[in-house]
Amino acid sequence: MDEVVRMMVGTAAALPNVFTLSNMTYCLAGLVFGIAWGAVPALTSTMAMALLMGFSAGMSLEGAIIFLLGVYSGSVFGGSISAVCINIPGKPNSVCTAIEGYPLFRRGEGGTALGTAIIASSVGNVFGTVVLIICTPFVLALALGIGAWEVFLLGLWGVLFSGSITDAPPLKGWLAGLIGLSIAFVGADSISGEIRYTFGIPALYGGVSFVSVLIGLFGFAEIARGLLFEADYKSASLNRIRISWRQLRDNLATLFNGSAIGTFVGALPAAGADVAAFLSYTVSRRLASPKQRAEYGKGSYRGIIAAETADNASVGGDLLPTLVLAIPGSTVAAAFMGALNLQGVVVGPMIEMSHPGLMEYVFASLLIVSLLLGIVGYLVAKPAIALLSVPRNVLLPSIMPICVMGAFAAQNNVVDIYIMLVSGVAGISLVMAGIPVAPICIGLILGPLVDLNLRRALLIYQDQDLSVLLTRPIGLVLIAVIAITVVGSMKAGKDPGATSQANP
Amino acid sequence: MALITPGFVFVIAIAMAVTAAVQVAPPLTTSAWLFPLFVSAAMAIVSAVLFVGEVAQRRRSIAAASVPAASTDIVRATRARVAGWLALSAGYAIATPQVGFEWATGVFLIFALKVFGGASWRVTLPIAAAMALLLPVIFRRLFFTLVP
């Protein structure tokens, strides 16, 4: 309990560092950019983070953190704008908001629906942040107690789990995860320095740039998909955004449940805002009275609150395994982790020792971002609707130069532009084959961690019978979890040969 | 693509597995190639299963494969657009370090907005010029990054 108090005091002490002119400018810029970006269908949160992480390398560490957290939180909420106004969820996590918000928009209650979504998102973000602050000391203590073997198993589970929770059959998800791990092998081995899979190209000795691959998969490939395969959307207008305090008061339990579900789901490796929103929406529907249930699908404020609190609460949850275990809670968190790596910050159980006070600064930043999300969301949502009048065919090609710059900016290396291009082409091929690309990102970021810790574990026990690894209790639990994940996913009855288009 | 992609991944995985198998040396437990060998072998197995599953599914549905001429035209047109977009993007990526970000971006956006976006010259030219000239300034001044 002392540790929780210490973390809270540390977070409070970090607040003055957040309230500097430059950091607050970055915070507001991140929120405005994130909300505007999220409002446009086809522009995802991961895409925003992937594009900006390269540029963040030029900022101060504190500025980069608060800017990216602003973009992250803002873009998660932003998806609800197009969901409510034009019935096109900007992000997968806004599908439930579209189901309930658009009927309200057609009834002339679009402004109230959006106002409700703004407050629910802000409350969810704050809740997730508070839970993050409270839980971090416990998870940190747990993380410091586990060895290399357990970290390897945890990372492996993260890769497998990310493959299991996509829309695609599990085999396709796992193949994507394995591709990500394979890309991570390229370059010099971290223990022996042995060069692997570089084909004699010196530029690859340091490994494949995570930024370039991420921009290729989530920038280049998504632009191509939106431009070549998706129809244009219609524009919309809104008179006034109204906050209905009555709706919020009547749905306080949903607000709490959604926040709790979102934070919990966010903390699971690779399960992000979309899973959180769907689960919370389903639970709220199950718990609803018959009268409330009848409103679902026809415009339910309760449904909007459930989905919006959960997807934004997942932001705080996402950061828990990301910061403490170095296992990203989602692809967006993976990009955040990559951005911290570019700044020379190695996240994980040792973060408190290697960068004292940094975690508290992240918490303080997220708290301020969460509180400002409601105000900035209220001010920016209506202008952001104007972005929907920009034709997709004009907007998407204009993002391509930012992809090229983003790939180059991380290391000022031209080879990274080519890697971005190859990753983008591969991403298009994979999506067309129904193979999801999100697990590639998780595999790529977890690859070095998994590889390093397996090698460490094998080195530690090289003079003993390796079966001793199977006697470690936490390891055994993790092996059981991996087995349950694999068997459970296979039993879900998905056809391995299915050709359905996967949701990336 | 559902057939080609797993097939391509299978070939890559086999090549990676063979490379790892050749490189892995005793003591096995400390070799840098042991885990890549496992991963590439698993990747080969999974991609092979997907490939075989896809072939089997195609055989099952081959009887009902009377595709209308119109739909094959659409497929052909889509493929041409995809190929065109990839060629344009590849050209852009390759040209950027050679001729500079400003020129490459300007030319790329003119082609992209006109050919793929179907935008008018009144929209295309100002956007291409603005992006080509303003983006480098924003990147240099705001994000303190170099421009290729």
Image (cartoon, coloured by chain):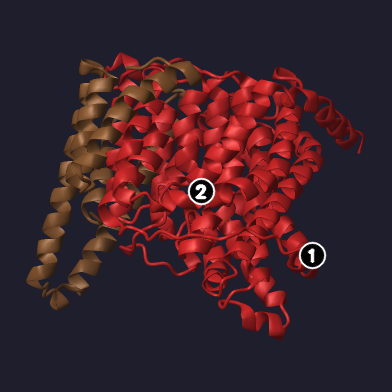
Chain colours: A red, B brown
Which secondary structure lies at badge 1? helix
* Residue A194 image-quadrant placement: top left
Residue B64 located left or right of residue A481: left
Tell me: B18 left or right of A26: left
Tag 1: residue type? Leu
**The C terminus of chain B - image quarter:** top left
Q: Identify the residue position indicated by label 2 in the image.
A: A384
Badge 2 element: helix
- Residues at marks 2 and 1, common chain? yes
Q: Is residue B63 visible?
A: yes
Give me the residue at 77% from left, 68% from top.
A246
CA neighbours of label 1 inside 10 A, class few (<14), some (14 to 19), many (20+): few
Quarter where residue A200 is shown: top left
- Looking at marks 2 and 1 on the same chain, the residue that comes earlier in the sequence is marked by 1
The chain under label 2 reads: A
In this view, the residue in front, B2 or A295, is: A295
Can you identify the residue that label 1 sits on?
Answer: A252
Depicted A476 relative to depicted B49: above or below: above
Cα distance, mark 2 to mark 1?
28 Å
Q: In percent of the image, x 9 and y 63: which residue is there?
A: B73
Res A270 seen here: no
Query: Mark 2: which amino acid?
Result: Ala
Residue at screen point 25% across, 17% down: B100
Q: Quadrant of the N terminus of chain B?
A: bottom left
